[in-house]
Image (cartoon, rainbow, N blue to C red):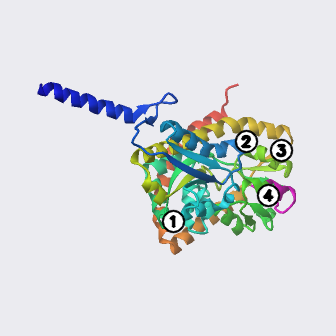
Amino acid sequence: MKRRKALSKIAIAATTTSTLVACNDTGGSPSVQADSLPKVRWQMVTSWPKSLDTIFGGAQTICDRVSAMTGGKFTIEPYAAGEIVPGLEVLDAVQNGTVQCGHTASYYYVGKNPALAFGTSLPFGLTAQQQNAWFYHDGGIEAMHQIYSDFNVISFPAGNTGAQMGGWFKKEVKTLSDLKGLTMRIPGLGGKVMSRLGVNAQVLTGGETFLALERGAIDAAEWVGPYDDEKLGLNKAAPYYYYPGWWEPGATLEVQVNKTQWDKLPTEYQEIFKAAAKEANLNMLAQYDALNRNALQSLISKGTKLAPYSPEILQAAQKASFEIYEENASKSPAFQEIYQKWSKFRSLVSQWNQINELSFSNFAAEFPVK
């Protein structure tokens, strides 16, 4: 009799567990089905227009996957830049509780704390894969959580563009002197480096960039890469397309969540939200790589003039970048703490990637299959 009761209890426990967390039919991810979990409705503001389906798609992926994995009990509605708040005010909206979460780039807000740049990308910093390794396995996410604690916000990587292009220019820029006096749309620490090189750096949203470039309010602009840049029509406003985007070798987008609202979520919902953010992070990078190759050929066929930055410009930009890092570290304990650990990681992972990936890429480029 006792044995039957014991077996009955085990069966009930197993049934309860499998009901609470089951695999859905869309990808094998955990799905919440317990009736006891609450219905939650959130809003997500973004820094992106909906027309940029890949970058706005990072936000959409999170919302779709959270809904799918909770059986529609936890839903998030994404909004384009300007629908609730301007694209560069996402952090403010999340911090103030205007909305529960937002999808944006942390380096838009370096004026609030220069260490926020680490959440997106630093000039001459980490590639996309290196950035993910730093976030997920070397304390990067925890470091950003510490920075965002001052804002009552918690953040998670939620998209990556890969190495970006170096921007559109109305005229050729062959030397450092060609940069001086230009006005360019470029955010983050990359903008501060360009300022050191004599450029007037401006921060504009994607929706504002084309008109500013076309009408001559700015002389140059960078956004992401061929696919998005063609969608924005930047090739119609400037003919010269430079590479590489040394200021964003692996730019991470992120989802920011109001910490008070986050703490109210059941643990199951928090774990599902983190899983959805990670899926968005990995999917966006793959999607950009799949789309940019054809988009670049399309731009070239329409008359875009592709050109590399000169060694003179790259060397000057690299020198200015690390001077700025040292200055920030001397002024900001938060920046210094992250920078020391980040620098060590960057050095070691770069040495490894020179041996494995770079050696292979160099050979494949030098001896392509006919």
**First along the sequence among labels 3 and 1:** 1
Residue 156 appears at what percent x and percent y? 51, 51
Task: Determine whether the residue tagged by mark 1 lies in a helix, strand or loop.
Answer: helix
**Mark 4 — residue?**
220
**First along the sequence among labels 4 and 3:** 4
The amino acid on which the numbered mark 4 sits, given as a three-letter code, is Ala
The amino acid on which the numbered mark 1 sits, given as a three-letter code, is Phe
In which quadrant of the rendered image does the C terminus lie? top right
Q: Can residue 145 be seen in this view?
A: yes
Instruction: Tell me what residue is drawn at x 48 percent, y 57 percent.
Output: 261
Task: Determine whether the residue tagged by mark 3 lies in a helix, strand or loop.
Answer: loop
Considering depth in this image, is 210 or 220 the residue closer to the camera? 210
Disc 4 to disc 2, C-alpha distance: 18 Å
Disc 3 to disc 1, C-alpha distance: 42 Å
Question: Which numbered circle lies on residue 214?
Answer: none
Q: Is residue 174 visible?
A: no
**First along the sequence among labels 4 and 1:** 1
Q: Determine crowd level at label 2: few under 14, some 14-19, many 20+ residues with C-alpha closer than 10 A.
A: many
Disc 2 to disc 3, C-alpha distance: 13 Å
Dividing the picture into quadrants, the one containing residue 170 is: bottom right
In this picture, residue 101 sits left or right of residue 1: right
**Mark 3 — residue?**
304
Disc 4 vs disc 3: Cβ atoms closer than 8 Å? no
Disc 4 to disc 3, C-alpha distance: 14 Å
Q: Look at the image and say whether residue 182 sits in the magenta stretch.
A: no
Q: Look at the image and say whether residue 217 sits in the magenta stretch.
A: yes
The residue stretch that appears in magenta: 210-221
